[in-house]
Structures are given as structure tokens and as C-alpha cells.
Image: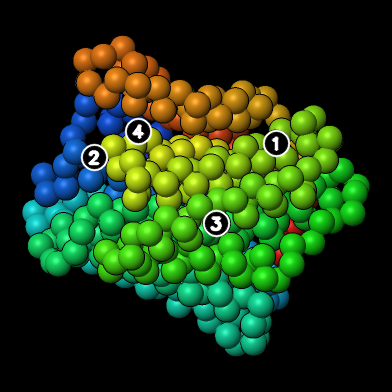
Amino acid sequence: MSTIGQHPFLSFAFRPFYLLAALFAAGAILLWAGGFQGAPEVSGFLWHAREMVWGYTGAIIVSFLLTAVATWTGLPPLRGIPLALLVLLWLLARAGLYLPHGLSISAVASGVFYLASVIIFAYPIIKTRNRRNYLPIAALLLFGITGACFDGVLLGGQGDILNALFAGTVMVAAIIGFVGMRVIPFFIARRLSVKQVASPQWVMLAGLLMPALAVVLLLSSTLPYAVTALCIATGILFLIQLIRWWERGVLSEPLLWILFIGFGFTGLGLIAFGWTYTFAPFYLSAATHLITVGGIGVMTLGMMARTALGHTGRAMKLSTPMPLAFCLMSAAALVRPLAFIDPTPTSPWYYIGVHGAGTLFALALLLFVYRYLPYLWQERADAKNNELKIVR
């Protein structure tokens, strides 16, 4: 019998984080839709935003990168007790809000979590001089900084709390763009047996650096027109990439079309955010939700489903009820904007947009947990000692 540190559940970062993050997000969304107002020191939409952007999404980003870095460098991944400690830091950042001096405890835990994640991620890349992946180190660091800035304002520091939130959201879109441009063409080529459409290096760099610059401007609350231009340009770039990657066979492969939908929503969300940030601030929330529900929700579900299959030695074929989960998450992204037709909390449009989308979002993640819990908990299906290298 294996010890706790040797259990398959702690063999790679994606295993505990995919499961715990999905459970957490499903519960948090259902609570939010049901009227829960969060923690004593972080209430209302600020609690909702913090926990979904730097809680749920952050866990998925970190776990994906810490899993992928072993493939990129050929060095052993974070596993066992050290991985368990990182998971505990993330859990403390979530649960700490409900302790005495909760915000301070949670903020410190969150900051240490992201700092530790950056160091763990960067070490093998720098050790192997894997220069191709230096930029993702900076991207993860900048994302962690946006969370620290958000918490800093909550704790009474200087800064604009909304701009810190927008900065975190745009940084997630930047990371989605970078990861998507790297893996989606690869997944298409592997699944459909077609030639991989390469993304020029300047496109890869622009897709990450333009929104990253917008994040810096948001954190400093300067040059709003530049933020608009950078976000719109990045969104257009993402949509052009989707057109370049398109193959008719995508429609018959749920593991592909879900990534197309998520990447497309991210591009549209960046365009909408860029426009509304300067010219139509009343609709900023609607634009932001295109990124968070459409981009983050759909893309993370698709990536978790695809990468967990490969890294646990299973065939790239979805089992019931995952196609339904994909449809539910995609529907959540379409339903959420209905709340902005009439944002009055008592209006039917608001109820459908918030409660309907929240329920769909949570159900999609719970279906993922139902199907993937055995995969994440048990040994690899093919009994190999090394995880399948599917992320480049």
C-alpha cells in the first residue's frame, strides 16, 4: 500500500487541483447565485470575483503549468508531500477568509501560493535553459501580482480595486491565448491527422505581450485608450488564429470544438472589454463575463478534460456525460449576458442570467468531477510510470 506522499493523487499537480478547483468553483457559483454574500471582510461581487479569478482559475493555470513543465524540460514534476503543501496553501487562501483576521491570512496564503508556484515552475525551465518557456514564467508572475494588488487594495492599500480585477481577468485571457496557440493546433493535428498549422513566433509573442502590457496599464490606472487598443487588437488576433486553425472535422470532435468555443469567447471578450472600458463602461460587467464564463469556464473545462485523459493514460475519447457538460458550460456563457438586458435584481432577465448561468456552470463542473474523479484518484490506466507527454 502506498503512503500518502506516494499516492497517485499526488503524482502530478493536475490531479488534486483539477478535482478540488472544480468542486470549489461549483459550490462557490451555486452559493453566489443563491444569494451568499461571501466572507466578512470580502463580500458581494468582490468575493465572487476574487475566488473565481485567483481561486478557481489560478488553481487550474498553476496545475496545468506545473504539469506541462515536466514535459517541456524532461525533469521530474512536483509531487508527493511538496505538492500536498502547495495544495494546502491554496486551500488556506480559500478557507482563511472565514477565520479571525481572515483577509490578512488569506492574502498571505494566496501570495505565498503564487510565489511558490512561480519558483517551482521557473526552476526546471531555468535549469535546462529552456528559453522558449521563459515568457510563461513572467506571465504567471504577473498574474500573481494582479492578485496581490487586488488583495492589497482590499486591505486598505492604494489602487483601484476594479482595475486590479480587470487586470487579473485580462491576464487570464493572455494566458489562455498563449496556451491555446501552443496546444490547440497540436491537438487538431493529432486528432484529425492533418498538418499542424504553425503560429508565427511574432503572433505568439504579440498574443501574450499585448494583453500583458494592458495589465500593467490597468494596474497603474493609466492610458485607458491604450488599454482599449491593446485588448481589441489581441481579441482580433485570437479570432484570426481560430480561422487559420479551422478544419471541418472539428465539429465532430467535442474535445476540439469545446476549445474553439472557449478560445473564441476569450477573443470576443477582449474586444468587448477593450471597447466598453473606454467607451461604454455601463456594459463592462457584461464584457468581463464574456471572458470569465465564456473564456475561462469553457476553456478550463475543455483543457481539464483533454489533458487529464492524456496524462492518466486513457484514450482521447469522451465518455458520458462529458459532451453534456461541454454543452452546459457553453450554454452558461450564452445565458449569462441576459442579466444585462435588465440588471434589476428582481427582473426575470437578471434571474435567468445569474441563476440560470450559475446553475449551468456548476452542473458542468460537477459532471466533470463525477466522470473524472476515478481518473484523477487512481493509477494510470496504461500502468506506465511516466505521465504521457501530450503538452508541448
The amino acid pointed to by label 2 is: Phe
- In primary-sequence order, the first of circles 1 and 2 is 2
Give yes or no for contact between labels 1 and 2 (Cβ–Cβ under 8 Å): no
- Is 209 or 354 nearer to us in this picture? 209
The residue beneath circle 3 is 233
Residue 127 relative to residue 153: left or right: right
When the figure is inspected, residue 227 is found, relative to residue 295, above or below; the finding is below
Among the 4 quarters of the image, the one containing residue 279? top left
Give yes or no for contact between labels 2 and 4 (Cβ–Cβ under 8 Å): no
Secondary structure of the residue carrying numbered label 3? helix
Secondary structure of the residue carrying numbered label 4? helix
Secondary structure of the residue carrying numbered label 1? helix
The residue beneath circle 2 is 45
Q: Position of residue 237 (x, y in %)?
A: 62, 55
x 19%, y 64%: residue: 159
Q: Position of residue 91 (x, y in %)?
A: 33, 53
Q: Residue furthest top?
A: 348
- In primary-sequence order, the first of circles 4 and 1 is 4
Q: Residues within 10 Å of mark 4 (few under 14, many from 20)?
A: many
